Amino acid sequence: QLKFKVDYIGTEHKPSYRETVEQVASLYKQKRDLNLQLTTQIRHLSEKIIDEKIATILKEKARTEKTQVEIENYQKIKKWIQNVPVSFPDAANLSSIGFLYDISAWGILLVNLDRYEQARGILDTFNDWWKENKKDFRGMPKSFNVLGGHPFEIEGSAGPNAWFLNFIAQYTYHSQDTKYLNLGRDIADHLLNLQNNDIHSPAYKALEDCPNANYYATEPNISAKAALRNFASTLDKFNQSGAGKYRQASKDIGIFLKSSHYVKKDKTTFVNLFGLKLGPTSETHLFHRGYGYDKEKQLWKWDWALPADLAPWAVLSMTQEEIMQITGVSSERLLQDTVEETEVNVDYDHPEKGKVKGLA
């Protein structure tokens, strides 16, 4: 009876082939839907995990890059502190400032003492700064904050740039290291850009103190004449191109220096039995401080102030032949005239010479 019942029930509910296929298809569809849902969930979960991972990596990268930048900044500051001297370490408001004049003079002294490694440290530091700022380079700034390695005074003045160019020329010539000649070219070209080419101007061929300064000082032109001449000689020594234009610019500055030079004529007098009589005329060879525009009077004129250092600097930086071409007198006479014109009594007792005189 049991057997009959089972067979009967089985036979009664046995599905057709079509129903069986539909059921199987339905099961596969459910399975596929579940797989699709599962795959979608896994993909979304994977994407979320990956996105979170990427965000973490980027955050870590940013932190690493920031750290690297900080490290590089501190390394840069360290390099400046190690290599570049400050000018007035005891001055509260200037204790971290190095003026290009002083830095250059110190560098030239190091070269003269054969301390090339120290001189190279200075040039390396400024060469790095130049590479970072080459695109907008308009001459070396007048001074730098050594603690940050950035300009303190941004003007690319002729005088400091001439001194630094002379430093590069002296170092390269004596050390045989030509690494900094490209920096030197940029500085030399900057000086040439400051040159007055108006043939009708009394300042013809002079270098302007800085762009739009409306003043042509004699001292930086003496410095630039020497620097451009020395740089040209250095380029020649190492068979580098371009020496000719710098040598010519140096010679041309002599035109302005000849205009800046003047002769002061004084009549000497003596007393005889019949009263005062004029004696022979004395000539004193001097330089104007410069040539510039007077805003109050609205005119260009020579600056008649007499800096006592012009003649000594000319004698130190130019040859006897150059001095003679410009002034018509010897180096000794030029120096003597300035000393006599500016000599003053000072309240100073020299340990060996006693009372001495100074220059005003």
Image (tube, grey):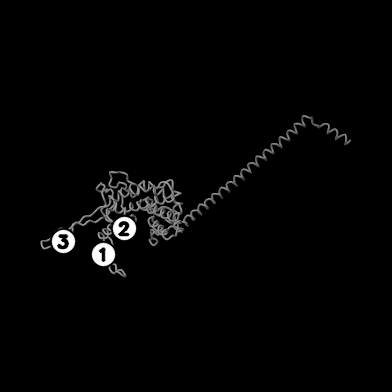
Residue 81: tell me if it is visible: no
Ranked by sequence position, the earlier of labels 3 and 2 is 3
Where residue 313 appears, as percent x and y from the top left, is 32, 56
Question: What amino acid does circle 2 point to?
Answer: Pro
Q: Are marks 3 and 2 in contact (CB under 8 Å)?
A: no
- Residue annotated with mark 2: 312
Question: Which is more foreground, mark 2 or mark 1?
Answer: 2
Question: What amino acid does circle 3 point to?
Answer: Phe
Question: Which is more foreground, mark 3 or mark 1?
Answer: 3
What residue is shown at x 52% (from left), y 52% (from top)?
Answer: 68
Q: Quadrant of residue 86?
A: bottom left
- Residue annotated with mark 3: 270
- Report how far apart the C-alphas of labels 2 and 1 lie in the structure: 19 Å
Give the left or right position of residue 14, taking residue 197 as reference: right
- Secondary structure of the residue carrying tag 1 is strand
On the rendered image, what quadrant is the C terminus found in?
A: bottom left
Ranked by sequence position, the earlier of labels 2 and 1 is 2
Question: Which label was assigned to residue 345?
Answer: 1
